[in-house]
Amino acid sequence: MSKGIRRDSPDANRRDPESILQGTLDMLVLRAVALAPMHGWGIAERIEQWSEDVLALGQGTLYPALYRLERRGLISSKWGTTENNRRARYYSLTPAGRKRLAAEIDSWRRLSRAINLVLQAVEE
Amino acid sequence: MRPQKPGPDRIDEEIAFHIEQQTAKHLRAGMNAEDARRAARIKFGAIEGLREGARDEVRGAWLRDIARDLRISFRSLRRMPSFSAATILTLGLGLGAAVAMFSVVNAVLLRPLPYPDSDGIVRLFQVSERGNRSNVSGPNFFDWRDGTKSFSHMALMSNWWGRAPITGLGEPRRVPSLRISREFFDVFGVGPARGRLFTAEEYATQQPTAAVVAAGFADRVGGPDALGKTFVLDGHTITVIGIMPREFDYPVGTEMWLPLSEEWANTTSRTAGNFNAIARLARGARLEAARAEISGVSRGLRARLGEGAVLVDAQIMPILELMTLTTRASLNMLLAGAFLLLVVAVVNVSNMLVARAVQRRKEFAVQLALGAGTSRLTRQLLAEALALCLCGAVVGIGLAAAALRAFVAIGPPGTPRLDTVAIDWASASAGVTLAVVAAGMLAWITAMGARSRTAASALSDESRSGSAGRRQTRLRQGLIVVEVAITFVLVAGAGLLARSLASVLAIDPGFRTDNALIVDITMGTQTDEELVQRARRQADIVRRLEELPGVEHVGLIDSFPVGNGAFRNGTFLEMTRADEFTNGSQIQELGSALGPRRGSAGYRLTNGGYFKAMGIPLRRGRLLEDGDAPGAPHVAVISESLAIAKWPGQDPIGRYIQFGNMDGDYTGLRIVGIVGDVRELSIERAAPSIVYASFVQRPRQAAAAAIVVRGPEPAIIADTVRRAIRELAPEVPVELRTSDGVLDAATGARRFNLWLIGAFGTVALLLAGVGVYGLIAFTVAQRRREMGIRLALGAHAGAMVRLIVRNGLALVIMGLVAGLGLTLAVSRFIETLLFGVTPSDPAVLISAGAVTLAAAAAATYLPARRAAAIAPIESLRSP
């Protein structure tokens, strides 16, 4: 009988390595608000533009992600006004979020480099 | 600082803003307004879906979505009918038992009596030297009333006529009656539904001329027209002046209330407990304060009057508590039993759900991978548990409704308000509440099992089912231990009750209960002349019955043993000769010299035939005889226990006693014989000391009498007996019963408790068996491959079976040990319900353990044997 990997449920502040997609989404959102506070629509727009329309966010997941990140204390939000004087909720990065983003980017780079190495090895 | 929780308003506003921005963008791109908005919405995705998705992340708000999850869960239940049916039925059994018992407890013990502020109505008792609660004497009552401020109203009650024989209003009938003093109805704060209550004059006269009747009495004689009708009681005409509301029923079953003069009551003996007392606490008075106050007055009386006050203290008890005194412990036990059964049912179902969760772990893993949060999964489990439990509650309430009908029909004898027991809103909501709690438990346990594996490990766990669910298996093993433990408690409880019943049935009541017919007749009279005449008529009836064919012995007694509650107890005095005293004041003059001459005993009026008819043995001397006529010297027969208690080492025969406070006759009774003890109070209580006098010599108290007719075929002679009595006394109502039922009634409550707890235990045993079977079968299925390998490598099939059985039984034994501890911890609560057996009786506990173990062993053996039959090749080939 093999032992089988056992792991406890992902708790609120730990990344769940199995759900890569979700982790990536979090990283992208953090990145999008890293420059300046931005509202939900703006975040979606930014990601879409930066990715040259490749990453059209499944928008139904954007707000759940925002609320989840806020609950984990990685971003914070407050009401603000847009350039058209429209009230909107602005999200900004917290110090914890900034640290987390750096760690995420770091590990993503390592991972993508690793994947690239593998892909190149196969091609040679 | 905690991050702010997004409220629904915020979510809505952000969504609106998002769509607005998107629409604006499309407009800038040249779309028309309508298309732009539609495109924005399409891009956004379903708004409702987003709201739900967003709220998933909002802590606490997820309960709102449970309705939707419930709908999904109900649909998924329909997809697996046999699993659903099994779990719902199991939960239904547990919930049904709990709901049924809750309904009984609520209706009998908890629901207030239908009188305004009924908590404030209390009964007052004297406390005797031996610490017993006893009836109240008139003078003591008035001293209580004068000395206390805690009560706004106080009244005396007297069981004067008991079942009063009335004539002149339909068939001659015996009507449960009560005499009451002036403030009785004020104590209850209830007025008549029709007519009026008694006037001050009516209360002041010793011979009643008016009666207030129950609604049931009125129904029988013309409903509202009953007002103004007259009947004859004791030779006097009495008019119905008032009809009480239908819910007024105190004491339970009373159909007629007659006035009792306080002035007269105050002249009665201080040493005889002639009355019951009832009172209403004054507004704002607390029960404890009232208890302290009346207790102080009583101790003062004792200090002033010494033994002449009889009481040493007083006791107060709310009427509901008194009414439910004998049933409270049983019903609480049955309720506890039902709850234990419910726990077994829930544990059993969680076992099934954990097993199913193991099968579904890939489903869960996929959901996790697709982004469902763990809270989402927990919510789904909760919804599924809730769906099961709500279905279970519906089934359970249905079962409870059916069970309660049976409960009311055969319920424990002597349970007050049993007829009001039914499924009502309170019990239905209790059922739903229990279902929700059970669902919470189920979901929690299942989640413990389901959460233990993360998505990836479960998804990749394609074929290695041997390793799957090890944690779940451990959880399920824990559940089995709990299930077995609780089952043991129920089985052991049933065992203790069975032993108690057996002990009670083994008691010799001191009299025979077979082949006897009991005729209850009541003949009231007033004057001394009538008394003598009544005694002669009663004697005539006895003689006439003795002559009937098929009759062996005929006895007459003023109160038939066991459970009539009419056991009159009093203080007698030993005399030096038959005519030492002629009145009470001579006795009082003796003062402190009285003490050693006193004795305590019940006072019975009977004839010699009674002892023969009842099979009560004569120990020494002689029985009462025909020669003990009114003119002859008065004689008495005493019970064995009295002889031992009062005259240890001496011969009571030939001594004189007087019992003037019982019937006002101070003539001495010469003791002529000693008879065997009879358990008069209750089959379970020690036989009281009794003085038996002759009903023809002392006729005063023998108004209500039971005639015992012994013959080989009591049922056959019933008709001739009835006809014979009717011939001699046409105006007397005759009620016949057999004495077989007398002891059945006494043991009925025990039988009922045993029957019910036994049923709970059996169901629990069944469920535990199913649980053990399920777990072992599951383990065997999981270990097919291992078994196959072992068998292929030459393991002996028998050894395999033993291995599996041993593993299963280890669990069961752990459960038994836990159950034993639990039983010892809780059984003291049912100690008062036990008889002749201690809660830790080793024989009972061992046999309960053996029964549980046997059931569990059978449940383990079946799947184990199947495991041994596995063909090695097949098991290795199978995925």
Image (cartoon, coloured by chain):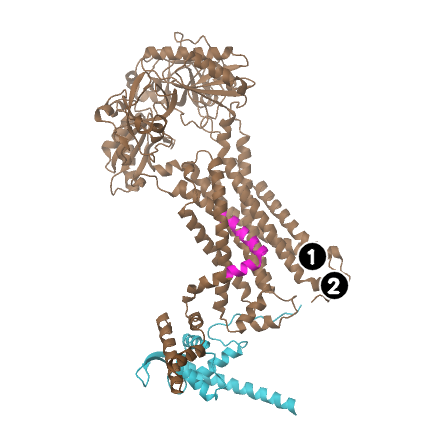
Q: Above or below — where is B303 with respect to B696?
A: below
Q: Would you call the spot at circle 2 few (<14 residues within 10 Å), some (14-19), or many (20 or more)?
A: few
Q: Quadrant of the N terminus of chain A?
A: bottom right
Query: Quarter-wise, where is residue B632 in the image?
Result: top left
The hue used for chain A is cyan
Residue that label 2 marks: B874
Mark 1 secondary-structure assignment? helix
Q: Is residue B79 magenta?
A: yes
Image coordinates of residue B385 in percent, x first then y, are 50, 59
Image coordinates of residue B317 in percent, x first then y, are 34, 37
The hue used for chain B is brown
Nearer to us in this view, B221 or B7: B221
Q: Earlier in the sequence, mark 1 or mark 2?
A: 1
The residue range painted magenta reads B73-97
Q: State the mark number for residue B16.
A: none
Q: Amino acid at mark 2?
A: Glu
Mark 2 secondary-structure assignment? helix
Q: Amino acid at mark 1?
A: Leu
Residue situated furthest right in the rendering: B794
Q: Above or below — where is B534 with respect to B108?
A: above
Image coordinates of residue B42 in percent, x first then y, are 45, 77
- Mark 2, chain letter? B
Residue situated furthest bottom in the rendering: A124
Q: Is residue B607 visible?
A: no
Q: Above or below — where is B348 with respect to B31?
A: above
- B736 on left or right of B199: right
Q: Quadrant of the C terminus of chain A?
A: bottom right
Residue that label 1 marks: B803
Residue situated furthest left in the rendering: B200
Nearer to us in this view, B56 or B443: B56
Query: Is label 1 or label 2 in front?
Result: 2
Image coordinates of residue A60 in percent, x first then y, are 45, 76
